[in-house]
Amino acid sequence: MRIALTGSSGKLGTVVARELRENGFDVIGMDVTGRRDPSFVQVDLTDYGQVVDAFTGVGDRHDGIDAVVHLGAIPAPGIRSDVATFHNNMTATFNVFWAAVRSGIRRIVYASSETVLGLPFDVPPPYIPVDEEYPPRPESVYSLVKTMEEGMATELVRWHPDLSITALRFSNVMNPEDYAEFPSFDADAQLRKWNLWGYIDARDGAQAVQRALETAPPGFDRFIIAAADTVMSRPNSELIAEVFPSVPVTREVKANETLLSIDKARRLLGFDPRHSWRDHV
């Protein structure tokens, strides 16, 4: 399967590119910056002409794409102005989706965000663990765009019943070198309450991408993608009682089990996170 991978130079994108290639995929990286390489094409995703041209063929690099993994975006709120974030991310995603549809590509996997769950949870979540069952609750312009992208995907698959679009609501992406800081979080439960103490190892993020490429049926669906555990050594019962005492807990949770439910991703994608910060610290 030949994959167009947007955002291939980013923190998650570089790991996704490596892992997919190691598992036999032909990956064409696409980003606004990147190392000159036969498997990389420099593309400004906000320019529709560049996107559709890159998908349909670039010189002798490739002659067409089988699927798109769209990770290219301003990756979080507060990096650029709200207006710049909206214009860049909304335009880029529309261009990628529309170019894929117009090019006959029928499989898209893309980065949505845990922020649509209501992060940074200054307004408490409706229940714990959070899941995909309640409507999006964007609390930033960045998250508003992610919510709108999911709405756009819903309509595109209605227009094109053979189209598959999978939104992966990635938690806070981490690499092994980031884990040295994790033990310090225990001193203050408020430091990481903004996403219910969640994270995702980039290698497991890549696993989720591969599972979606291989298994997602036609239609649109959304999945929370997080590690199996929290960033904390302190038990969940203690954290919830201190920070979210009035929020209902809908089922029994283990001491350090993720509070960003990955049950749906496990059930429908076969997602099985293999990496934990506890193995590195």
Image (spheres, grey):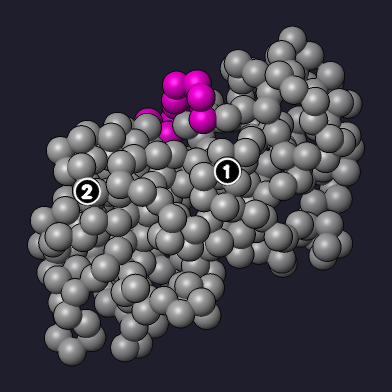
Quadrant of residue 7 within the rendered picture: bottom left
Q: Please report the residue visible at 62 percent of the width from the left and 38 percent of the height from the top.
A: 263
| Quadrant (top left/top right/bottom left/bottom right) for the N terminus | bottom left
Magenta stretch: includes residue 140: yes
Question: Could you say where residue 279 lies in the image, as x and y percent from the top left?
Answer: 83, 63
Question: Could you say where residue 219 lies in the image, as x and y percent from the top left?
Answer: 30, 41
Q: Where does label 2 land, which residue? A: 162
Answer left or right for 39 relative to 180. left
Distance between mark 2 and mark 1 Cα atoms: 22 Å
Per the rendered image, the range of residues in magenta is 132-145
Q: Please report the residue visible at 75 percent of the width from the left and 23 percent of the height from the top.
A: 251
Q: Please report the residue visible at 87 percent of the width from the left and 36 percent of the height from the top.
A: 255
Quadrant of residue 2 within the rendered picture: bottom left
Q: Where does label 1 land, which residue? A: 267
Magenta stretch: includes residue 23: no
Answer left or right for 136 relative to 53. right
Which amino acid type is marked by label 1?
Answer: Arg
Say few, some or many: other residues with alpha carbon within 10 Å of mark 2 (under 14 / 14 to 19 / 20 or more). few
